[in-house]
Image (cartoon, rainbow, N blue to C red):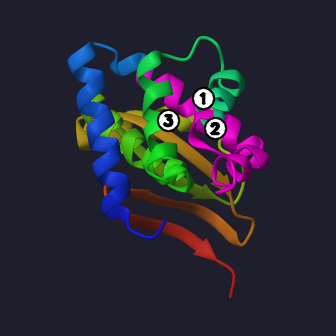
Amino acid sequence: MRDRRVALRYAQALLELAEHAGELEAAYGDLMEAQKLVARHPEISNLLMNTTIGREEKEDFLEKVLPEKISALVLNFVKVLVKKRRFQDLASVTEEFQHFYEEKKGVQRARVESAVPLDEVLQEKLRRALAKKTGREIILETTVKPELLGGLVIDFEGAQIDGSFRTA
């Protein structure tokens, strides 16, 4: 992304529109689904960013390629990105929208690195401890890093707790 401010503006605009229309949940799900589709099929981006194809053709293509159940709000939003030649920013806009959405819903993501996979019981204990500390619902994103000999590295709320033993 050339400028994070652009993604923030578009994400904020979609959030406000979705809240005003009472479609925040649907907009979140539809935008995530659209982003997944585009990520799986890079040819979609190539076609939508092709300057030799007219805007109307691109809009028709979007209506055919995006899932039928997608809300008119998100479909029109993606069309605006195409019209304003900002479709390449869809991933960044989606990421910023996800941050806004999670903040509004009281959700906090925490990234956890460990030497071995964490079982469900340990993940739940960790989730509860972090929820108690933050006062928010916690979504754990776990990663196995074999270079850690033991312990955990936890990133959340812009801070890192490193309780690991690393190889030399």
Task: State the image coordinates of residue 168 (x, y, percent, origin top left).
Answer: 68, 88
Q: Residues within 10 Å of mark 2 (few under 14, many from 20)?
A: some
Query: Magenta stretch: residue 158 in it?
Result: no
Q: In terms of secondary structure, where does tag 3 sit? A: helix
Q: Which residues are magenta?
A: 27-56
| Of pointers 1 and 2, the one earlier in the residue sequence | 1
Q: Nearer the viewer, residue 12 or 101?
A: 12
Residue to which mark 2 is pinned? 58
Query: On the image, which quarter does residue 25 sit in?
Result: top left
Q: Residues within 10 Å of mark 1 (few under 14, many from 20)?
A: some
Residue to which mark 3 is pinned? 79
Query: On the image, which quarter does residue 102 sit in?
Result: top left
Residue 106 visible in the snapshot: no
Image vertical order of residue 160 relative to residue 18, above or below: below
Q: CA distance from mark 3 to mark 2?
A: 8 Å
Residue type, label 3: Lys
Residue 33 marker = 1
Rendered residue at 24%/22% (across/down):
19
| Of pointers 1 and 3, the one earlier in the residue sequence | 1
Image vertical order of residue 50 relative to residue 137, above or below: below
Residue type, label 2: Lys
Q: Nearer the viewer, residue 85 or 156?
A: 85
Rendered residue at 64%/64% (across/down):
150
Rendered residue at 34%/58% (across/down):
6
Q: CA distance from mark 1 to mark 3?
A: 15 Å
- Judged by depth in the image, the label closer to the viewer, 3 or 2, is 2
Q: In terms of secondary structure, where does tag 1 sit? A: helix
Residue 93 marker = none
Task: State the image coordinates of residue 44 (x, y, percent, origin top left).
Answer: 73, 43
Q: In terms of secondary structure, where does tag 2 sit? A: helix
Q: Nearer the viewer, residue 144 or 93?
A: 93
